[in-house]
Image: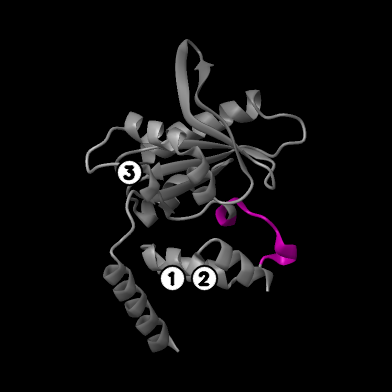
Amino acid sequence: MRQLQRQMASQFYERTALSRNKVAMLAKGAKAQPGDAVSADEEIRHPLVLEFLGLRDEYSETDLEDALVRHIESFLLELGNDFAFVGRQRRLRIDDEWYRVDLLFFHRRLRALVIFDKKLGRFTHADAGQMNVYLNYAREHWVQPGENPPIGVILCSGKGEALVRYATDSLPTKLLVREYLTALPDEKVLAGELARTRRKLEAKK
């Protein structure tokens, strides 16, 4: 029952239809969580549907961030439960260089800071390296006693599953790559995708 409630609350069915790796999504959804444990993979939704931002076809990373902050309540609802907004453009200094973290949140149930880095294009391995630097710095300087290690989330418009796996596996910190959509797919497209997925699943039985 708890597993079904989680899937309904997170729109697991709809997100599986939109996902490019449906097999992995379904395999994850089929696994019960021992003791209803909370994980970052489950708590941070994928993909993120950001149609409420009202962005046009062409926009910059600054436009995207400004829109997210203007619509912070809707963004928090889309992210999932128990997120608290901490700030934007949080500065950190490493050696003699200054860097900025795009968006910083705290997740109450995970008891961890969540760093968001937004990208307009597809995910690259360099994005993972940059986020890993932010996470290691945050773990050393920003984490409070009793909190868990920080979590990194890279928001991108596309990704390759193999590249994500090779770039993020075995990292000392939790790093997630999440695609975002600035508009919901057409109803007919979504219905067709659901039908195709259903036929594939039935063929495997």
Q: Nearer the viewer, mark 2 or mark 3?
A: 3
**Picture quadrant of residue 149:** top right
Quote the CA–CA distance across marks 1 and 3. 31 Å
Quadrant that contains the N terminus: bottom right
**Picture quadrant of residue 17:** bottom left
Per the picture, the main secondary structure of the magenta-coloured stretch is helix
The reply to whether the C-beta atoms of the residues labelled 2 and 3 are less than 8 Å apart is: no
**Circle 3 is placed at which residue position?**
54
Q: Residues within 10 Å of mark 1 (few under 14, many from 20)?
A: few
Is 81 covered by the magenta stretch? no
Residue 27 numbered mark, or none:
2
What residue span does the magenta drawing correspond to?
A: 33-42
Specify which label sits upstream in the sequence, 2 or 3.
2
Name the amino acid type tagged 3.
Answer: Gly
Residue 175, image x, y percentages:
52, 44
Q: Is residue 30 left or right of residue 145?
A: left
**Picture quadrant of residue 16:** bottom left
Q: Residues within 10 Å of mark 3 (few under 14, many from 20)?
A: few
Residue 74, image x, y percentages:
49, 45
Q: Nearer the viewer, mark 1 or mark 3?
A: 3
Q: Is residue 67 above or below residue 17?
A: above
The reply to whether the C-beta atoms of the residues labelled 1 and 2 are less than 8 Å apart is: yes
Residue 23 numbered mark, or none:
1
Q: Is residue 46 above or below residue 59?
A: below
